[in-house]
Image: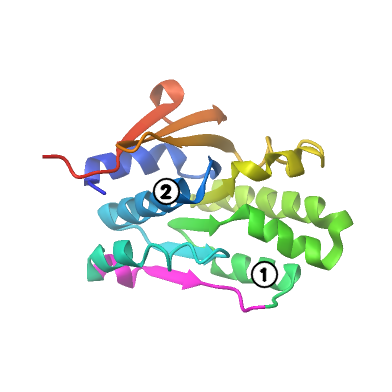
């Protein structure tokens, strides 16, 4: 992905101090978002904590290999152990959050981890978790970027307002093969609420 320092700052600066939920339509788009996150972290020299529930960054290993060593040194990756329960996963996430950029992929998997413990309280637990991350973002001036697959939207809708009101902002993501189109549906982000990022090198 062609992504310079100016574009990285343009993407990240408006999101500082917020927990932002990115709605992705499919796996391919989610992987492109992973590359965007990595490129932005590398270009700005931000410290980064990645909480990976979906082998998200294993699938983006080639992008990790392209990140310069100095940026790699500033990235911590946490993959919950197989069979971890919801509380254990949540504690692992909270222990990792630090100043800089914090990435959670995906909210769908986190929800199902909570459901395995107690489906009746999974929505409540997930709501509390994201509200807590939002609080940590605002008070610690960190950035929390959360991905969620849009295909699970009906599941979340059946449990009240959880899906559409999580975090400080909600961003819909689309890809046309050449670009990522990010549109802020709720909260505030970029000028005119939309940011377009090229996904292929120019020239």
The structure residue drawn at horizontal position 35% and vertical position 57%, both measured from the top left corner, is: 46
Give left or right: position of 88 versus 118: left
Where is residue 74? Give x, y as percent. Answer: 35, 68
- Asked whether the viewer can see residue 174, the reply is yes
- Depth check, front residue: 93 or 113: 113
Dot 1 crowding, Cα within 10 Å, few <14, some 14–19, many 20+ = some
Estimate the x, y position of residue 93 in percent, counting from the top left: 60, 66
> Would you name the residue on which mark 1 appears?
89
Tell me which residue sits at (50%, 45%) in the image: 17
Q: Position of residue 180 (x, y in %)?
A: 37, 37
To which residue does mark 2 refer? 33
Chain part drawn in magenta: 70-82
From the viewer's perspective, tell me whether residue 118 is left or right of residue 107: right
Q: Earlier in the sequence, mark 1 or mark 2?
A: 2
Secondary structure of the residue carrying numbered label 1: helix
Q: Height in image: 182 above or below 65? A: above
Query: Under tag 2, what secondary structure?
Result: helix
Residue 188 visible at all: no
Of residues 84 and 70, the one drawn nearer to the viewer in this rendering: 84
Q: Is residue 77 magenta?
A: yes
x and y, in percent, of residue 83 in the image: 70, 77
């Amino acid at each position: 992905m062609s992504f310079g320092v100016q574009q990285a700052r343009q993407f990240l600066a408006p999101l500082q101090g917020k927990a932002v939920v990115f709605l992705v339509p499919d796996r391919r788009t989610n992987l492109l978002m992973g590359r965007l996150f990595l490129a932005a972290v590398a270009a700005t020299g931000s410290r980064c904590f990645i909480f990976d529930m979906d082998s998200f960054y294993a699938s983006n290993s080639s992008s990790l290999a392209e990140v310069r060593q100095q940026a790699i040194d500033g990235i911590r990756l946490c993959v919950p152990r197989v069979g971890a329960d919801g509380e254990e996963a949540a504690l692992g996430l909270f222990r990792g959050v630090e100043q800089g950029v914090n990435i959670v992929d995906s909210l769908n998997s986190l929800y199902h981890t909570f459901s395995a413990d107690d489906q009746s309280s999974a929505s409540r637990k997930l709501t509390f978790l994201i509200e807590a991350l939002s609080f940590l973002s605002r008070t610690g001036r960190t950035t929390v970027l959360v991905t969620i697959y849009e295909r699970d939207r009906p599941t979340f809708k059946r449990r009240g307002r959880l899906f559409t009101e999580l975090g400080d902002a909600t961003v819909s993501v689309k890809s046309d093969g050449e670009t990522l189109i990010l549109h802020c549906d709720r909260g505030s982000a970029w000028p005119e609420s939309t940011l377009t990022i090229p996904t292929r090198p120019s020239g």
